[in-house]
Image (cartoon, helix red, strand yellow):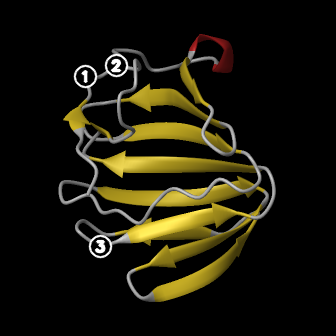
Amino acid sequence: MYSSDPLRPLGKVFVTNAEAKTDTRRPAAPVTLKTMMVTDGVLMIEIKQGKGHKPPPHSHPDHDSILYLAKGRMSVTIGDRTFIANAGDAWHHPPGVMHHSEAFEDCTVVEIKNPPRQTWPDSPVK
């Protein structure tokens, strides 16, 4: 299970891509998390995952996530079910359900979290 921290609303109704806070990581494959919008109720992040990125199975007990694959192809496991996601596909991580993925190629994922929670460990993005 990953820990999570509440995020404060940005106080904006419009955020340009250039001004979004970005956190780049370099595990086995590069990952960039971009905080696009935070309100009292939701968080929207853009996640760019390099080919081969495979975070460990984990769950989040305190929020829902809806994800949309904007670019690429990946394997997505939610609970005991595995799916092959292609650009244009969407999925849901219910609270407390184990999930993980593997990028088969460079991918761009848009994730919405309710309530807004920061779940990426040790991130400077607040």
2 or 3: tag closer to the N-terminus: 3
Which part of the image, by quadrant, shows the C terminus? top left
Give percent across and percent down for residue 11: 33, 15
Contact between marks 2 and 1 (CB within 8 A): the answer is yes
- Category of crowding for the residue at label 1, using alpha-carbon neighbours closer than 10 angstroms: few (below 14), some (14–19), many (at least 20): few
In the rendered image, which quarter is residue 58 located in? bottom left
Give percent across and percent down for residue 38: 37, 29
- Category of crowding for the residue at label 3, using alpha-carbon neighbours closer than 10 angstroms: few (below 14), some (14–19), many (at least 20): some
Task: Identify the element where label 2 is drawn.
Answer: loop
Disc 2 marks a residue whose amino acid type is Lys
Number of marks in the rendered image = 3
Residue at (60% x, 40% y) in the render: 27
3 or 1: tag closer to the N-terminus: 1
For residue 51, side relative to residue 59 (left or right): right
List the residue tagged with mark 3.
Answer: 97
List the residue tagged with mark 1.
Answer: 8
Give percent across and percent down for residue 101: 56, 65
Q: Distance between the residues labelled 2 and 3?
A: 25 Å
For residue 20, side relative to residue 106 (left or right): left
List the residue tagged with mark 2.
Answer: 126
Nearest the camera: 101 or 40?
101
Give percent across and percent down for residue 113: 36, 48
Using the image, determine if residue 20 lies above or below residue 56.
Answer: above
Nearest the camera: 59 or 115?
59
Task: Identify the element where label 3 is drawn.
Answer: loop
Disc 3 marks a residue whose amino acid type is Val
Using the image, determine if residue 77 lies above or below residue 20.
Answer: below
Q: How far apart are marks 2 and 1 (CA)?
A: 8 Å
Task: Identify the element where label 1 is drawn.
Answer: loop
Frontmost of labels 3 and 1 is 3
Disc 1 marks a residue whose amino acid type is Arg
- Category of crowding for the residue at label 2, using alpha-carbon neighbours closer than 10 angstroms: few (below 14), some (14–19), many (at least 20): few
